[in-house]
Image: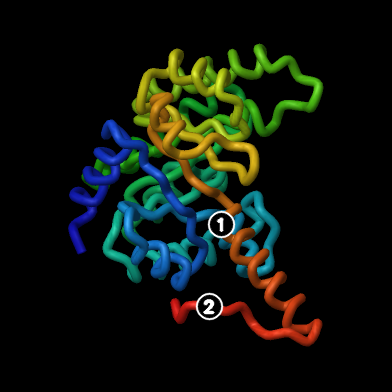
Amino acid sequence: MADLSTRAQTLLELHTAPEILALTNVWDVVSAEVVAATDGTRALATASHGIASTFGYPDGERIPLELHLAMVERIVAAVDLPVSMDLEGGYGHPGETVRRAIEIGVVGGNLEDQMKPLDEAVSAVEAVLAAGRSAGIDFVLNARTDAFVKAGPDADRREVLAEAVRRGQAYLAAGAPCVFVPGVVAREEIEALVAALGERRLSVISVPGRSLPVSELEALGVARVSTGPFTQRVALTALQDAAVDFLAGGTLPEGTRALN
């Protein structure tokens, strides 16, 4: 496996290349191995929600950090690709959490701002990047703003967009290479974010039945699109559908592949 610095540089180049970086999020070793072996996979990203669910915890830093890191460490060891970790909000100490993540081989990550005061959120971004420099790598921070996901159903979308831009620009100015804006799916809002943040600076999540295709996001100048918890839900949907058919007197689906 390449050294940390090389993997970090590779992950950064994937974010800034003309081609969009499509990341299928994983949550355990077998999901990581399956995705890593799939043509077109160039890096991996973990899903905190998926890892928490695997151990029976709800999302939102409810899973102990030690357990979370232990699973990510197993994922990193199982693949020969750069791995980006969903750091949630940094577990109260973003710089220290990233230091520990780097120690297990992680070279990038998402960090939620949780709509904290902007100066606090910027300080967290700076702490993460400083932890990377201390470790001798350019940690690829996908700085997340929760402006859209925490907006109420009656919120003025123009105001939400403006706040996402304000925060995103602040994170870029602090040194983050990419800004993650989950909850944005409308073409015109994506276009506005790309115009404000710059091409190959915006990261979004693909929402089943709502998001634009990856090819269209690439054409709009999006840097990165990931799947978050939805890949685990795809797998669980297939499991439940198979169980329904089997328990109703049928058989398991034809075409089931031996992927483990």
Which is nearer the N-term, disc 2 or disc 1? 1
Residue wearing tag 2: 256
For the rendered model, the colour scheme is rainbow
Q: Examine the image and state in which quarter residue 56 appears.
A: bottom right
At 47% from the left and 26% from the top, the residue drawn is 122
Instruction: Answer left or right for 203 relative to 243.
Output: left
Q: Nearer the viewer, residue 148 or 245?
A: 245
Q: Which structural element holds mark 2?
A: loop
Q: Which structural element holds mark 1?
A: helix
- Judged by depth in the image, the label closer to the viewer, 2 or 1, is 2
The disc placed on residue 32 is none
Q: Examine the image and state in which quarter residue 199 appears.
A: top left
Which amino acid is tagged 1?
Thr
At 23% from the left and 46% from the top, the residue drawn is 10
At 39% from the left and 23% from the top, the residue drawn is 172
Q: Nearer the viewer, residue 141 or 217?
A: 217
Q: Which of 240 and 134 is in front in this view?
A: 240
At label 1, counting other C-alpha atoms closer than 10 Å, the crowd grade (few under 14, some 14-19, many 20 or more) is many
The disc placed on residue 231 is 1
